[in-house]
């Protein structure tokens, strides 16, 4: 299957280990020497409607991609590689 970047941006990224939705593809990392796609990037989720910044971006290497379907991209990532910051909203997080 051939997929354009615009089509790739409409695909939802799901971790098969946890079943959690990571978001949508926002960017692609290319190796300019070989013209190969190295990774896809899912931007971090906004905290407090973006007023308090964003979580860290999730960079998914091509070797971690299990399947690219019509609507979703299934990836195999351990939890420690995915969530480097808390994604819950609480008063303690506002003070960080």
Image (tube, rainbow, N blue to C red):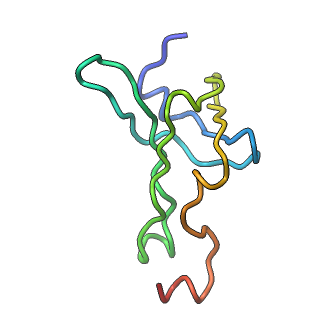
Image-quadrant location for residue 35: top left
Residue situated in front as seen by the camera: 20 or 76: 76
**Residue drawn where x is 45% and y is 42% of the image:** 41
As drawn, 89 above or below 33: below
As drawn, 89 above or below 28: below
Please state if 6 lies on the left or on the right of 65 as rendered: left
Please state if 30 lies on the left or on the right of 10 as rendered: left
**Residue drawn where x is 39% and y is 24% of the image:** 37
What is the residue that sits farthest to the left in this orientation?
33
Q: Quadrant of the N terminus?
A: top right
Image-quadrant location for residue 13: top right
**Residue drawn where x is 49% and y is 71% of the image:** 49
Please state if 49 lies on the left or on the right of 89 as rendered: left
Estimate the x, y position of residue 7 in percent, counting from the top left.
48, 26
**Residue drawn where x is 49% and y is 29% of the image:** 8
Estimate the x, y position of residue 33 in percent, counting from the top left.
23, 20
What is the residue that sits farthest to the top in this orientation?
1
As drawn, 59 above or below 75: below
Estimate the x, y position of residue 65 in percent, counting from the top left.
59, 29
């Amino acid at each position: 299957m051939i997929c354009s970047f615009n089509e790739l941006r409409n695909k939802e990224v799901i971790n098969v280990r946890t079943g959690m939705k990571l978001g949508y593809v926002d960017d692609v990392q290319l190796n300019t020497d070989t013209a190969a796609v190295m990774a896809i990037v899912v931007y971090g989720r906004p905290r407090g409607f973006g007023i308090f910044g964003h979580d860290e971006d999730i960079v998914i290497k091509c070797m971690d991609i299990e399947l690219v379907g019509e609507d979703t991209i299934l990836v195999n990532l351990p939890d420690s590689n995915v969530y480097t910051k808390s994604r819950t909203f609480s008063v303690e997080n506002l003070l960080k």
